[in-house]
Image (spheres, rainbow, N blue to C red):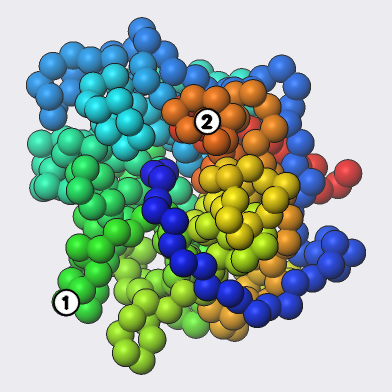
Amino acid sequence: MKRIALLPVALLIIFVLTDSQTKNWTFGPFVRPEGVNPIIAPDSQSYFHCPMRDSMLYWESMATFNPAAVVKDNQVHVLYRAEDLTGEMKIGGHTSRLGMAVSDNGLDFKRLKEPVFYPEDDNQKQYEWPGGTEDPRIVETGEGTYVMTYTQWNHKTPRLAVATSKDLENWTKHGPAFEDAYEGKFNSMHTKSGAIVTKREGNHLIAQKLAGKYWMYWGVPKIYLATSENLTDWEPIVNEDGSLKPVLQPREGYFDSWLVEAGPPAILTDQGILVMYNAGNSAVNGDPSVPDSTYTGGQALYSVKNPAKLKARIDKPFIQPEEEFEKSGQYPSGTTFIEGLVPFKDKWFIYYGTADSNVGVVFWEPEK
């Protein structure tokens, strides 16, 4: 996540459901478990040999945040973004890699000593050096493959990219998601945050085709759609003039007045497609109860028959910075930046980044 310049806000005239109506489709309420947060914090002792710098370094000594999550072998696996202390002392000025932590209960985690995904001397170096690999989301296929969307950051242009794995530790990079679409038209623009539509099967979120295609909500400061035949090569949905077609935009007077950004994997429900998203507030024309530039979480519902059709949207954040660790660090305005969502042990867990510095967890028990 990087700070984006304030953009003109487009007004959306939409039908916002009341609280009594939203309870039929929204997830939550989510609660913070006592005594466990932050579940992952920077570690100044773990080190590895970096192929990009050809040296040993402490790869997660600066920050650990913005995680993906998936259930494997009846354990929650969290892949989190980690930054070292090299580079410029500003947001986005360091190198990011992905570490992995594993938990039997979704709350207490043990970390691997080395990152599982990082910039290497490979065919993606032009996109990933020196900024690295950031902000993952993970879904599964019915055949047991893990598909990860992530941001490639070369300190010039953030690009939404795709990688796949059979074990979460050994990954194949497939390059930018939109590299070939429309003859590369969108490959040089800023793209990030890919939330693939999934269907819940037990503790797993399986990528699901609709009308013969996979779908993905993506982007910031507006959210767009893309489709794919194979989960690695994606084609954005565009207007007749070839411009990107937004499906969710910032709203004046609300917590999402500054920007909206796709969150964890989208989920097919009985009511439609549930899309959780990250929202930035503006002090100029936003929600006065939410501090300026604060990142909170929203939920929106889309039609299964037409994934671009917005059916409903909450008008207050369902998660926002409250604790000190969520409002201090690299981003003191505060973030509860949601990227990881899994069903596990009769609960729904959200794993989120806090102030670009730590990882937190909240959960919801639907039966209660």
User: Amino acid under label 1?
Assistant: Glu
Question: Residue 190: horizontal and vertical position, in percent?
Answer: 29, 59
Local crowd size for mark 2, using a 10 Å CA cut-off: few (<14), some (14–19), many (≥20):
some
In the image as oriented, which residue stretches furthest toward the top?
Answer: 45
Question: Residue 163: horizontal and vertical position, in percent?
Answer: 30, 50
Query: Label 2 to label 1, Cα distance in Å?
Result: 41 Å
Looking at the image, residue 165 lies above or below residue 10: above
Q: Which of 204 and 26 is in front in this view?
A: 26
Task: Report the side of 223 relative to 92 (left or right).
Answer: right
- State the image quarter where residue 224 is shown: bottom left
Verify CB contact (< 8 Å) between mark 2 and mark 1. no
The secondary structure type at the circle numbered 1 is: helix
Which image quarter is the C terminus in? top right
Question: Residue 315: horizontal and vertical position, in percent?
Answer: 73, 61
Question: Residue 226: horizontal and vertical position, in percent?
Answer: 40, 72
Q: According to the image, label 2 marks what residue? A: 332
User: Amino acid under label 2?
Assistant: Pro
Q: Nearer the viewer, residue 92 or 144?
A: 92
Which image quarter is the N terminus in? top left
Residue drawn at point x = 63 percent, y = 42 percent: 291
- State the image quarter where residue 47 is shown: top left
Q: Which mark is residue 123?
A: none
Q: In front: mark 2 or mark 1? A: 2
Looking at the image, residue 200 lies above or below residue 1: below
Residue drawn at point x = 27 percent, y = 47 percent: 152
Residue drawn at point x = 55 percent, y = 65 percent: 250
Local crowd size for mark 1, using a 10 Å CA cut-off: few (<14), some (14–19), many (≥20):
few
- State the image quarter where residue 18 is shown: bottom right
Q: According to the image, label 1 marks what residue? A: 183
